[in-house]
Image (cartoon, rainbow, N blue to C red):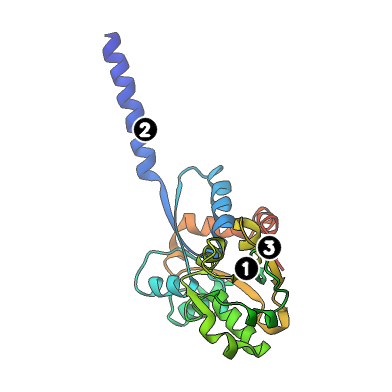
Amino acid sequence: MKHMATWSMAVFFVLILLTSTAMAAEVNLSVAASMKEVVNQLTDNFNKKNLNVKFLKNYGASGSLAKQIENGAPADIFISANTEWMDYLKNKKLMDNRSISAFAYNELVFVGKPSLNVKSVRDLVKLEKIAIGSPKSVPAGEYAMTALKKAGVDKELEKKLVMAKDVRACLMYAELGEVDGSFVYKTDALQAAKNVKILFIVPQDLYPRVTYPIGLTATGSKNEEATAFFRFLQSAEAKSVLAQLGFAVR
Protein backbone atom coordinates (compact mmCIF):
# COMPACT_ATOMS: atom_id res chain seq x y z
CA MET A 1 0.00 0.00 0.00
CA LYS A 2 2.86 2.34 0.83
CA HIS A 3 4.42 1.78 -2.61
CA MET A 4 1.02 2.32 -4.21
CA ALA A 5 0.56 5.64 -2.42
CA THR A 6 4.04 6.80 -3.41
CA TRP A 7 3.37 5.85 -7.03
CA SER A 8 0.04 7.68 -6.98
CA MET A 9 1.64 10.84 -5.62
CA ALA A 10 4.32 10.69 -8.30
CA VAL A 11 1.69 10.36 -11.02
CA PHE A 12 -0.24 13.25 -9.46
CA PHE A 13 2.75 15.61 -9.57
CA VAL A 14 3.63 14.58 -13.14
CA LEU A 15 0.06 15.34 -14.20
CA ILE A 16 0.23 18.75 -12.53
CA LEU A 17 3.51 19.50 -14.30
CA LEU A 18 2.15 18.43 -17.68
CA THR A 19 -1.03 20.41 -17.16
CA SER A 20 0.78 23.59 -16.14
CA THR A 21 3.15 23.23 -19.10
CA ALA A 22 0.26 22.73 -21.48
CA MET A 23 -1.48 25.78 -20.06
CA ALA A 24 1.56 28.03 -20.43
CA ALA A 25 0.68 30.83 -22.85
CA GLU A 26 3.17 31.66 -25.58
CA VAL A 27 4.24 35.17 -26.50
CA ASN A 28 6.34 35.57 -29.65
CA LEU A 29 8.81 38.45 -29.64
CA SER A 30 10.62 39.78 -32.72
CA VAL A 31 13.28 42.16 -31.45
CA ALA A 32 16.22 44.11 -32.88
CA ALA A 33 19.50 42.36 -31.99
CA SER A 34 20.78 45.34 -29.99
CA MET A 35 17.86 44.91 -27.58
CA LYS A 36 18.77 41.33 -26.62
CA GLU A 37 20.07 41.92 -23.08
CA VAL A 38 17.36 44.35 -22.07
CA VAL A 39 14.51 42.18 -23.38
CA ASN A 40 15.98 39.07 -21.74
CA GLN A 41 16.02 40.91 -18.41
CA LEU A 42 12.51 42.30 -18.87
CA THR A 43 11.04 38.89 -19.74
CA ASP A 44 12.76 37.40 -16.68
CA ASN A 45 11.31 40.15 -14.48
CA PHE A 46 7.84 39.62 -15.94
CA ASN A 47 8.03 35.84 -15.45
CA LYS A 48 8.67 36.26 -11.72
CA LYS A 49 5.03 37.29 -11.37
CA ASN A 50 3.60 35.51 -14.42
CA LEU A 51 4.82 31.92 -14.37
CA ASN A 52 2.35 30.75 -17.01
CA VAL A 53 3.88 32.79 -19.83
CA LYS A 54 6.48 31.32 -22.18
CA PHE A 55 8.44 33.78 -24.30
CA LEU A 56 9.68 32.73 -27.73
CA LYS A 57 12.34 35.27 -28.75
CA ASN A 58 13.59 36.03 -32.22
CA TYR A 59 16.52 38.48 -32.30
CA GLY A 60 18.01 39.83 -35.51
CA ALA A 61 18.26 42.70 -37.96
CA SER A 62 15.07 44.77 -38.01
CA GLY A 63 14.64 44.40 -41.76
CA SER A 64 15.04 40.63 -41.64
CA LEU A 65 12.53 40.39 -38.79
CA ALA A 66 10.01 42.56 -40.64
CA LYS A 67 10.31 40.37 -43.74
CA GLN A 68 9.84 37.25 -41.61
CA ILE A 69 6.67 38.69 -40.07
CA GLU A 70 5.42 39.64 -43.54
CA ASN A 71 5.99 36.03 -44.64
CA GLY A 72 3.95 34.63 -41.77
CA ALA A 73 6.46 34.11 -38.96
CA PRO A 74 4.69 34.16 -35.57
CA ALA A 75 5.10 37.50 -33.79
CA ASP A 76 3.05 39.22 -31.12
CA ILE A 77 5.34 42.16 -30.39
CA PHE A 78 7.84 43.81 -32.74
CA ILE A 79 10.65 46.10 -31.57
CA SER A 80 12.58 47.68 -34.43
CA ALA A 81 15.81 49.69 -34.35
CA ASN A 82 14.31 52.32 -36.66
CA THR A 83 10.91 53.62 -37.68
CA GLU A 84 11.32 52.54 -41.31
CA TRP A 85 10.73 48.82 -40.71
CA MET A 86 7.88 49.48 -38.29
CA ASP A 87 6.25 51.65 -40.96
CA TYR A 88 6.85 48.87 -43.48
CA LEU A 89 4.75 46.41 -41.45
CA LYS A 90 2.22 49.12 -40.64
CA ASN A 91 1.68 49.76 -44.34
CA LYS A 92 1.21 46.01 -44.85
CA LYS A 93 -1.57 46.18 -42.23
CA LEU A 94 0.30 43.71 -40.02
CA MET A 95 0.53 45.96 -36.96
CA ASP A 96 -1.98 47.22 -34.42
CA ASN A 97 -1.37 50.86 -35.33
CA ARG A 98 -2.81 52.23 -32.08
CA SER A 99 -0.13 50.45 -30.05
CA ILE A 100 2.92 51.81 -31.90
CA SER A 101 5.11 54.19 -29.91
CA ALA A 102 8.76 55.03 -29.21
CA PHE A 103 10.22 52.51 -26.77
CA ALA A 104 13.80 53.75 -26.34
CA TYR A 105 16.68 55.63 -27.97
CA ASN A 106 20.37 54.90 -28.60
CA GLU A 107 23.58 56.37 -30.02
CA LEU A 108 25.89 55.24 -32.80
CA VAL A 109 29.54 54.75 -31.82
CA PHE A 110 32.73 53.43 -33.39
CA VAL A 111 34.65 50.72 -31.53
CA GLY A 112 38.11 49.24 -31.99
CA LYS A 113 41.26 48.17 -30.16
CA PRO A 114 42.22 50.60 -27.38
CA SER A 115 45.56 51.24 -29.10
CA LEU A 116 43.91 52.42 -32.33
CA ASN A 117 44.39 56.15 -32.90
CA VAL A 118 40.96 57.00 -34.28
CA LYS A 119 39.03 59.91 -32.82
CA SER A 120 36.60 61.01 -35.53
CA VAL A 121 34.82 59.94 -38.70
CA ARG A 122 37.56 61.60 -40.78
CA ASP A 123 40.19 59.38 -39.13
CA LEU A 124 38.52 56.27 -40.53
CA VAL A 125 40.22 56.76 -43.91
CA LYS A 126 43.46 55.53 -42.28
CA LEU A 127 41.95 52.09 -41.60
CA GLU A 128 41.88 49.00 -43.83
CA LYS A 129 38.64 47.23 -42.81
CA ILE A 130 35.53 48.63 -41.14
CA ALA A 131 32.42 46.61 -40.26
CA ILE A 132 28.92 48.00 -40.59
CA GLY A 133 25.54 46.31 -40.65
CA SER A 134 24.18 45.77 -44.15
CA PRO A 135 22.26 49.05 -44.73
CA LYS A 136 19.45 47.27 -46.60
CA SER A 137 18.30 45.38 -43.51
CA VAL A 138 20.31 46.63 -40.51
CA PRO A 139 19.33 50.07 -39.17
CA ALA A 140 22.76 50.55 -37.52
CA GLY A 141 24.32 50.13 -40.95
CA GLU A 142 21.88 52.58 -42.48
CA TYR A 143 22.66 55.13 -39.76
CA ALA A 144 26.40 54.57 -40.33
CA MET A 145 26.15 55.04 -44.10
CA THR A 146 24.15 58.24 -43.61
CA ALA A 147 26.87 59.55 -41.29
CA LEU A 148 29.68 58.62 -43.70
CA LYS A 149 27.94 60.32 -46.61
CA LYS A 150 27.20 63.46 -44.62
CA ALA A 151 30.82 63.56 -43.43
CA GLY A 152 31.96 63.22 -47.03
CA VAL A 153 34.07 60.08 -46.58
CA ASP A 154 31.78 57.42 -48.04
CA LYS A 155 33.62 57.20 -51.39
CA GLU A 156 37.01 56.87 -49.69
CA LEU A 157 35.73 54.06 -47.48
CA GLU A 158 33.63 52.28 -50.10
CA LYS A 159 36.05 49.37 -50.63
CA LYS A 160 36.95 49.11 -46.96
CA LEU A 161 33.48 48.33 -45.63
CA VAL A 162 32.66 44.80 -44.44
CA MET A 163 28.91 44.13 -44.36
CA ALA A 164 27.50 42.23 -41.37
CA LYS A 165 24.12 40.56 -40.85
CA ASP A 166 23.34 42.61 -37.73
CA VAL A 167 24.94 44.99 -35.25
CA ARG A 168 26.13 42.20 -32.94
CA ALA A 169 28.00 40.60 -35.84
CA CYS A 170 29.74 43.96 -36.34
CA LEU A 171 30.89 43.91 -32.74
CA MET A 172 32.05 40.29 -33.06
CA TYR A 173 34.20 41.12 -36.11
CA ALA A 174 35.94 43.85 -34.13
CA GLU A 175 36.32 41.63 -31.06
CA LEU A 176 37.98 38.90 -33.15
CA GLY A 177 40.26 41.36 -34.93
CA GLU A 178 38.79 40.58 -38.35
CA VAL A 179 38.30 44.31 -38.92
CA ASP A 180 40.03 47.40 -37.55
CA GLY A 181 36.82 48.70 -36.06
CA SER A 182 33.03 48.67 -36.27
CA PHE A 183 30.00 50.88 -36.11
CA VAL A 184 27.72 49.66 -33.29
CA TYR A 185 25.29 51.12 -30.82
CA LYS A 186 26.54 52.59 -27.56
CA THR A 187 24.63 49.94 -25.60
CA ASP A 188 26.31 47.11 -27.54
CA ALA A 189 29.70 48.47 -26.56
CA LEU A 190 28.69 48.95 -22.92
CA GLN A 191 27.04 45.54 -22.55
CA ALA A 192 29.04 43.16 -24.70
CA ALA A 193 32.46 44.58 -25.68
CA LYS A 194 35.44 42.84 -24.09
CA ASN A 195 38.45 43.38 -26.33
CA VAL A 196 37.46 46.70 -27.87
CA LYS A 197 36.36 50.08 -26.58
CA ILE A 198 34.43 53.11 -27.80
CA LEU A 199 36.87 55.22 -29.83
CA PHE A 200 34.38 57.98 -30.60
CA ILE A 201 30.68 58.77 -30.53
CA VAL A 202 29.32 59.58 -33.98
CA PRO A 203 28.10 63.22 -33.91
CA GLN A 204 24.30 63.32 -33.80
CA ASP A 205 24.12 65.90 -36.57
CA LEU A 206 25.41 63.29 -39.04
CA TYR A 207 22.47 60.87 -38.78
CA PRO A 208 18.86 60.64 -37.47
CA ARG A 209 18.39 59.81 -33.81
CA VAL A 210 18.35 56.06 -33.19
CA THR A 211 14.76 55.34 -32.25
CA TYR A 212 13.27 51.97 -31.24
CA PRO A 213 9.56 51.86 -32.02
CA ILE A 214 7.50 49.11 -30.40
CA GLY A 215 4.10 47.75 -31.29
CA LEU A 216 1.72 44.84 -31.04
CA THR A 217 1.18 42.98 -34.28
CA ALA A 218 -2.35 42.51 -35.56
CA THR A 219 -2.37 38.98 -34.12
CA GLY A 220 -0.56 40.02 -30.94
CA SER A 221 -3.31 42.48 -30.08
CA LYS A 222 -5.61 39.46 -29.67
CA ASN A 223 -3.19 37.62 -27.36
CA GLU A 224 -4.07 38.46 -23.76
CA GLU A 225 -0.62 37.60 -22.38
CA ALA A 226 1.10 39.56 -25.15
CA THR A 227 -0.94 42.67 -24.36
CA ALA A 228 -0.16 42.24 -20.65
CA PHE A 229 3.57 42.07 -21.37
CA PHE A 230 3.24 45.02 -23.75
CA ARG A 231 1.74 47.08 -20.92
CA PHE A 232 4.60 45.98 -18.66
CA LEU A 233 7.07 47.31 -21.23
CA GLN A 234 5.54 50.77 -20.78
CA SER A 235 6.02 50.68 -17.00
CA ALA A 236 8.44 52.60 -14.80
CA GLU A 237 10.18 49.30 -13.99
CA ALA A 238 10.86 48.64 -17.68
CA LYS A 239 12.13 52.18 -18.22
CA SER A 240 14.47 51.76 -15.26
CA VAL A 241 15.96 48.59 -16.79
CA LEU A 242 16.42 50.37 -20.13
CA ALA A 243 18.26 53.23 -18.45
CA GLN A 244 20.47 50.86 -16.45
CA LEU A 245 21.58 49.18 -19.67
CA GLY A 246 22.45 52.45 -21.37
CA PHE A 247 19.32 53.27 -23.38
CA ALA A 248 17.67 56.70 -23.28
CA VAL A 249 13.93 56.61 -22.63
CA ARG A 250 13.03 60.13 -23.78
Q: Which residue is mark 3?
A: 114
Distance CA(mark 3)–CA(mark 2): 55 Å
* N-term mark: 3 or 2: 2
The correct choice, above or below, for 10 with respect to 173 in the image is above
Q: Secondary structure at mark 3?
A: loop
* N-term mark: 3 or 1: 3
Q: Secondary structure at mark 1?
A: strand
Q: Quarter of the image containing the N terminus?
A: top left
Image position, residue 198 (x, y; %): 68, 65
Q: Residues within 10 Å of mark 3 (few under 14, many from 20)?
A: few
Q: In this orientation, which residue lies closer to the viewer: 139 or 42?
A: 139
- Answer left or right for 9 relative to 137: left
Q: Which residue is mark 1?
A: 185
C-beta proximity under 8 Å, tags 3 and 1: no
The correct choice, above or below, for 40 with respect to 105 in the image is above
Image position, residue 184 (x, y; %): 60, 69
- Answer left or right for 207 relative to 70: right
Q: In this orientation, which residue lies closer to the viewer: 191 or 73?
A: 191
Q: Amino acid at mark 2?
A: Ile
Q: Amino acid at mark 1?
A: Tyr
Q: Residues within 10 Å of mark 2 (few under 14, many from 20)?
A: few
C-beta proximity under 8 Å, tags 3 and 2: no
Q: Which residue is mark 2?
A: 16
Image position, residue 65 (x, y; %): 44, 70
The correct choice, above or below, for 30 with respect to 151 in the image is above
Label number found at residue 18: none
Q: Amino acid at mark 3?
A: Pro
